[in-house]
């Protein structure tokens, strides 16, 4: 049977990682929209990859479980690239928490039950999780370990506590890295690894939408005042993803890799620091 790489979220970053780790494997592309998976499947197929597609709603356990069953019917799952999500400009706080926080917890739980020996997963978080002030230890523990189906009932995530889309996004992305650290323990019992990447502003269609949206001026300022002085490319994230999923990253699990050109450094200790 052919080993399977599951790519959830058929955007530029998921595709960039998949191209580096999927040679000789079957790529199962999953996205909420058929047109997304169809266009990316054509690009990958034309580049020589074996690809099939499926629709998934990561905020639905039934849908995520169906994705797992589709993947395991093809072959052993040796890689999971979770790059699906919504941005602060796109969605309400409730939707962000449901898709980015709960959805990631679902993916980690469901695929952690079936990931093959020697397998690896990468979750795309965000620099935004690094700009959130420190949470209480018990809040960290709750975000990391609360069973997925109880997660959105946490008091810290109720509408009176999370009223802003950006705060919901920051909480979700902080929660992603905490959840991956906890899940790395469980995945490790199967001989598998899982890590997060927290990219900064990466030039994808989603980022360009953000840059032209109401927070665009702030994002452009971040770029200008960062050490790198530019945004990143999906291929740069792909390089880190390939390290984390490949044999060179065999000693790395439960970790979060911040790659934002120095934006977070400038936020805490430089010119982007809040006045």
Image (cartoon, rainbow, N blue to C red):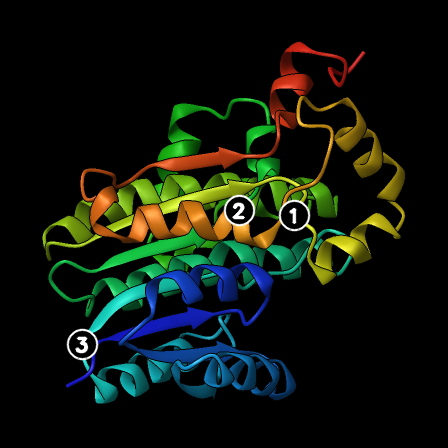
Q: Earlier in the sequence, mark 2 or mark 3?
A: 3
Q: At x 47% / y 85%, what residue is drawn?
A: 45
Q: Which residue is rendered at x = 50% and y = 26% of the image?
A: 135
In the image, residue 121 sits, relative to residue 181, either above or below, namely: below
Q: Position of residue 92 (x, y in %)?
A: 73, 58
Q: Residue sitting at 71 percent across and 24 percent down?
A: 226
| Disc assigned to residue 202 | 1
The correct choice, above or below, for 86 with respect to 69 in the image is above
Q: In terms of secondary structure, where does tag 1 sit?
A: loop
Observer able to see residue 35: yes
Q: Which quadrant holds the C terminus?
A: top right
Distance from Cα at disc 1 to Cα at disc 2? 9 Å
On the image, the x and y values in percent for residue 264 come to 62, 25
Q: Which residue is mark 3?
A: 76
Q: Residues within 10 Å of mark 1 (few under 14, many from 20)?
A: many
Mark pair 2, 3: CA separation: 28 Å
Q: Nearer the viewer, mark 1 or mark 2?
A: 2
Q: Are the residues tagged 2 and 3 within 8 Å (C-beta)?
A: no
- Which quadrant would the N terminus be assigned to in this image? bottom left
Residue hosting label 2: 236
Q: Residues within 10 Å of mark 3 (few under 14, many from 20)?
A: some
- Secondary structure beneath label 3: loop
CA distance for labels 3 and 1: 31 Å
């Amino acid at each position: 049977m052919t080993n399977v790489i599951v790519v959830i979220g058929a955007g530029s970053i998921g595709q960039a990682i998949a191209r580096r780790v999927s040679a000789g494997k079957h790529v199962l592309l999953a996205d909420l929209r058929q047109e997304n998976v169809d266009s990316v499947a054509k690009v990958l197929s034309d580049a020589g990859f074996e690809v099939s597609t499926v629709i998934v709603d990561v905020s639905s356990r039934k849908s995520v479980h169906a994705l797992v069953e589709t993947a395991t019917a093809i072959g052993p799952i040796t890689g999971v690239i979770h790059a699906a999500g919504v941005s602060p400009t796109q969605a309400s706080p409730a939707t962000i928490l449901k898709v980015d926080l709960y959805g990631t917890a679902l993916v980690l739980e469901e695929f952690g039950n079936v990931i093959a020996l020697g397998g690896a997963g990468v979750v795309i978080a965000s620099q935004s999780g690094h700009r959130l002030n420190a949470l209480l230890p018990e809040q960290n523990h709750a975000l990391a370990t609360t069973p997925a189906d109880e997660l959105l009932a946490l008091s810290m995530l109720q509408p009176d506590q999370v009223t802003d889309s950006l705060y919901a996004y920051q909480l979700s992305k902080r929660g992603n890295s905490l959840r991956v650290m906890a899940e790395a323990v469980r995945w490790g019992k199967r001989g598998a690894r899982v890590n997060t990447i927290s990219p900064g502003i990466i030039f994808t269609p989603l980022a360009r939408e953000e840059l032209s949206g109401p927070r665009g001026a702030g994002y452009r300022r971040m770029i200008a005042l960062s050490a790198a002085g530019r945004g990143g490319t999906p291929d740069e994230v792909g390089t880190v993803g390939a390290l984390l999923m490949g044999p060179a990253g065999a000693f790395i699990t439960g970790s979060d890799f911040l790659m934002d050109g120095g934006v977070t450094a400038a936020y805490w200790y430089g010119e982007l620091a809040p006045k």
